[in-house]
Amino acid sequence: MRFASEAATGTVFAEEVLILRGGRVIDPRSGTERVADVAVDGRSVVAVAPSLATEGATVVDVTGLVVGPGFVDLHSHVHSIAGQRLQALDGVTTTLDLEAGLMPVRRAYARAAADGRLLHYGFSASWGDARAAVHLGATPAADLHASLKRLGDPAWQRSSSPSERAAWLRLLESELEAGALGIGVLMGYAPRTDPDEFLDVARLAARTGTATFTHVREIIEADPTTPIDGSFEIVRAAAETGASMHHCHVNSTSRRHVDRVLGLLDTARSNGSRVTVEAYPYGAGSTAIGAYFLAPERLDAWGLQPASLRLVATGEQIASVARLAELRATDPGAVCVVSFLDEDRPEDAALLQRALAFPDSIVASDAMHVEWPDGSTDSREWPLPEGGQTHPRTAGTFSRSLRRMVVETEAWSWAEAFRRCSYLPAQVVAGFAPAARTKGWLDVGADADLVVIDPATISDRATYVDPTRPSVGVRHLLVDGTFVVRDGAMDVGAFPGRPIVAALA
C-alpha cells in the first residue's frame, strides 16, 4: 500500500493513484452509506475515508453522486463487445453466462481473451451442450448460436440412458475441473426428462463444491402432466443433496404464479437449503423460437398466442400458428421476444415488482447479443451502428431496477440495491471462484470495479421498439481500476475485462 491510513492527511500519492472525491459511498457488505473519498491504486481500493490528501493523485470530483461496487450479472448471454458496452452503461462490471454456459469452457475463455472484453467474464459448464454431445454426437464449439439451433431437437430433449447419463456427467465434471463456474441447466428446454437426472447434476455440484444455475422445467400450473414441478425440483434437489442451487429468472418461468413459487423458495431457505433466486424487471423474455415451450400446442398453457412472439432480427410479429410452425422448422435458432406479462397493466406490473422485492432476490439481466440485418452479432463501432436489435434488458435491466425500486418506489435503499445487484450475486460464486471474493463490496481490499451513478438521472432508455438505446445516469465505470466509462462517455480503447474461473478444492 502506498499510504498509511485516513489519518495520514499529509500522505503524498503516486501519480497512478485515483481518488473519487466526495461521493455517497455505499458498501453493501456492511450495509453502510457515507460521504467519503475512495482511493484506487491499480486494481484495488486502498482507502475509503472522509477526507484523503490528494497531493500527487488524480482526483475526480463525484460530489452528489452515488459510488458503489460495479454490478455483477450472473445471467448474461452477451459474448460480444457491442453487448458489453450496453451493459457497461447499465453499471455492470462483471458478466457471467451461468444459466446456459458454454462448452468447451477453455475455448470460451480463450476466445473472449483473444477478442478482448471491457467487462469481466465467465461461463458455467453447459448441461445442454454435454447432453447434445452424448445424444447427438455433436461437437461443442463454445458457440451460443449453435446451441440455440439445437434447442428444439427432440433427440436432445429426451431422457438419457444410464450410460448416456454417466457420459455427460463425466463431461460436466471435466468442465468443472477446467474452471467452469458451476453447471448451467436449461431444464426448461427438455422438460420431460427423468427428474433423477437433475438429482445427479445436483450431487455433482455438491461433491465439487460448486452450484447449479437452472432454467426450471414447466411448473404444475402450466403443465399438470409435468414429471415434477420445475421450482419444486430445485427445492427438492437442494434439500436432498445439500447443493447450492440458483433459480434463474423466476419472473419469466413463474409468470402469474410467481407468488406461489416465491413462497416455496422462501420455505426452502427457512429450512436451511442453499437456494438463491434472480429476477429481471420486464414482462417479456427472449429465447430461440424452437424452444419446447413455444410449440404451437404449448402456447395456451401460458395464455400466449403466435402474436405474443416477435423475431428480434427482423421485428416480425408472428401472425399465425402456420407461420410459427414454419419458423420452428426452418430457423429454430432464431431469437424472438416473448411477451408473457403486460407491463402496462397494474396487476402484471405488481407481479414484476414482487419478484424484485422478494427478500434476497438478485437482479440479473438474461441479456442477449445484438443482431444486425446482415446477420452480424458484434461491432467495435461506438455508438452502435443503426439497425441493431436485441431485448431491451441487455441495455436497461439494472438502471430500470434502480429507477423503479430506489428512485420511484423507495422499496430499496441504495445499500439494498447494491446488495442485490453487486454483493449477493458475487457471493453466489465466491465459494468456488476466488476472483469473486473481492467483488461486490466497497472497502479497503476490494477490487476496483466501481460504478458512479447520478441518482437524479439514472434510468433505462431501451424499449422494445428501440432496444439498443443505452441507459443514462452511469457517470463513471471502472473495471479493474480502468475507466471504461468516464463522464458518461465510453472509452472505446478500454478492454480491462478479466476471466472469472472456478478453483475446485
Image (cartoon, rainbow, N blue to C red):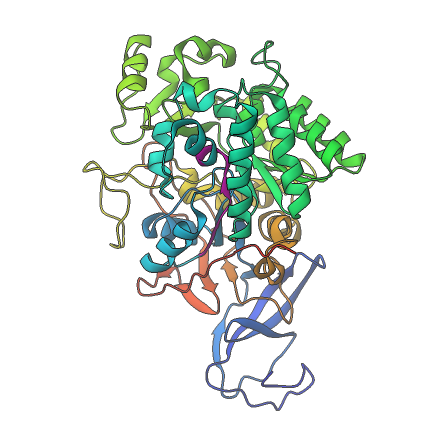
Closer-to-camera residue (51/114): 114
What is the quadrant of residue 257 in the picture? top right
Q: Position of residue 56 (x, y in %)?
A: 49, 88
Q: Please give the count of numbered marks on the rendered protein.
A: 0
Q: Residue furthest right?
A: 271
Looking at the figure, which quarter contains the C terminus? bottom right
Q: Position of residue 9 (x, y in %)?
A: 64, 87
Looking at the figure, which quarter contains the N terminus? bottom right
Q: Residue at x 32, y 14 (%)?
A: 324
Q: Position of residue 43 (x, y in %)?
A: 51, 71
Q: Is residue 331 left or right of residue 252?
A: left
Closer-to-camera residue (48/192): 192
* Vertical position of residue 22 compared to residue 148: above or below: below
Q: Is residue 72 left or right of residue 35?
A: left
Res. 280 visible in picture: no
User: Which contiguous range is marked in magenta?
Assistant: 120-129
* Vertical position of residue 333 compared to residue 141: above or below: above
Q: Position of residue 69 (x, y in %)?
A: 57, 59
Q: Indicate yes or no whether the magenta region holds residue 104.
A: no
Q: Residue furthest front?
A: 163
Q: Residue at x 66, y 53 (%)?
A: 431
What is the quadrant of residue 67 in the picture? bottom right
Chief secondary structure of the magenta portion: strand
Res. 219 visible in picture: yes
Q: Residue at x 55, y 36 (%)?
A: 169
Closer-to-camera residue (125/61): 125
Q: Residue at x 32, y 41 (%)?
A: 370
Q: Indicate yes or no whether the magenta region holds residue 128.
A: yes
Q: Residue furthest left?
A: 374
